[in-house]
Amino acid sequence: MKLLKIGLIILFLSIINAGPLIAIAQSSDTAPVLQDVILGFGKSEADSAGILFAVAREKGFFSAEGINLVEGDAHDLDYGGNRAEAEVADIIFMGRARVYLEESTRPGMMKIFNINTQDETNWDDVILIRKDFNLSSLSKLEAKEPFGLLGGGPARGPLVRLLLEKNNLKAQNFTLVNLPDKIQDYTGKVSLNSLTGINILYAREPFLSLLLAQGNWKIFIDEPLFAKNIFSPWPMTMTLFGVKFLKEKPALAKKVLQVFDKAMLFIKEHPEEANELCSKYLEKRYGVELKLRHVNHLRYDQVSKELIQRQSDWYFDNKLIPSKIKAADLFFDESMLGH
């Protein structure tokens, strides 16, 4: 009887001591294993559409889906010669001009799953002038004044020329100056010599907010410049899958879609918190607080293929891409994920 009691005590103590080990084993078994997804930035993430990435990161949407987002500027990724972004990045955040250029020169490499648009209610670009520059209307602008272009890609040139023509000015008489669009150049930590001699310019976020924060600039024309003067809605920055990634990791691609759906829903339901998350994220990344204007964030199935065809044709007509593309071929489709 005494031996039985001693045996029961030993068994009880063994169970107690094994408890922490069992808990550790259980927690390690249930800990999520994160899979890398490489994100290539073909456009500054401080673009107003970057709020999707900021919200998804700060709210933990990527990790909740088992994703470790590996970030890198698409310009700096190892291309291995003439390799495209879609060969070295799983998803790509890119301006529409580069999307159309890639599709016209390397067709079939990428598929759009998110599109940001400007319309009559939401836009993130304006015409700025210096506060001490005396100009009452664009029609009064003298040809001697160089017109700066900051952010917005190659479409800004044809847009500004159109604005000048609409104001009875001969666009060919004006000098359009492409300004460097690295965000660090406008944070106040680097000289703004590139703006010397510029009194008027087109500015898109984040440069709109950065220049206004400098205190030397004011808004001159505040309207949806592309949507009002070309057509509306006007597609802007896009997020795309690399086709290679879709073929090799369809289940992971599906999780990426779920992350973006969560982010878009959160922005819609909690706009103020989303804006604050974006500002804090940009401050942490760039050392400057930015309160950006934001545009419309849409899924691939909320934008018509005809709209993208119309815009890409406009890019070709304005000699911004070498050949026309078939826009329908650019769109992601659920069938690409298999069954």
Image (cartoon, rainbow, N blue to C red):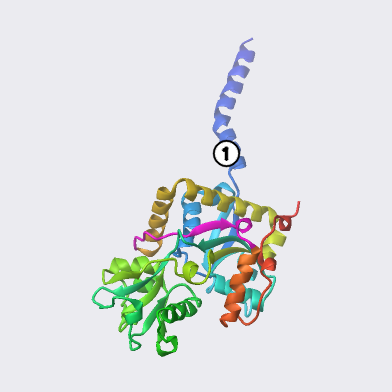
Name the residue: 47% across, 76% down. 159
Instruction: Find disc 1 in the rendering and name its residue.
Output: 27
Place of residue 153 in the rendered image (x, y in percent of width and height, measured from the top left): 49, 75
Q: Which residues are magenta?
A: 288-304
Name the residue: 58% across, 31% down. 18
Mark 1 residue type: Ser
Q: Nearer the viewer, residue 29 or 330?
A: 330
Is residue 261 positioned above or below 20 on the image?
A: below
Left or right of residue 244, residue 263 in this image: left
Q: Nearer the viewer, residue 96 or 82?
A: 96
Is residue 312 positioned above or below 296 on the image?
A: below
Task: Count how many numbered circles sit on residues in the image.
Answer: 1
Name the residue: 32% across, 81% down. 140
Q: Is residue 298 magenta?
A: yes
Figure quadrant of the N terminus: top right
Place of residue 184 in the rendered image (x, y in percent of width and height, measured from the top left): 38, 71
Place of residue 92 in the rendered image (x, y in percent of width and height, measured from the top left): 58, 65
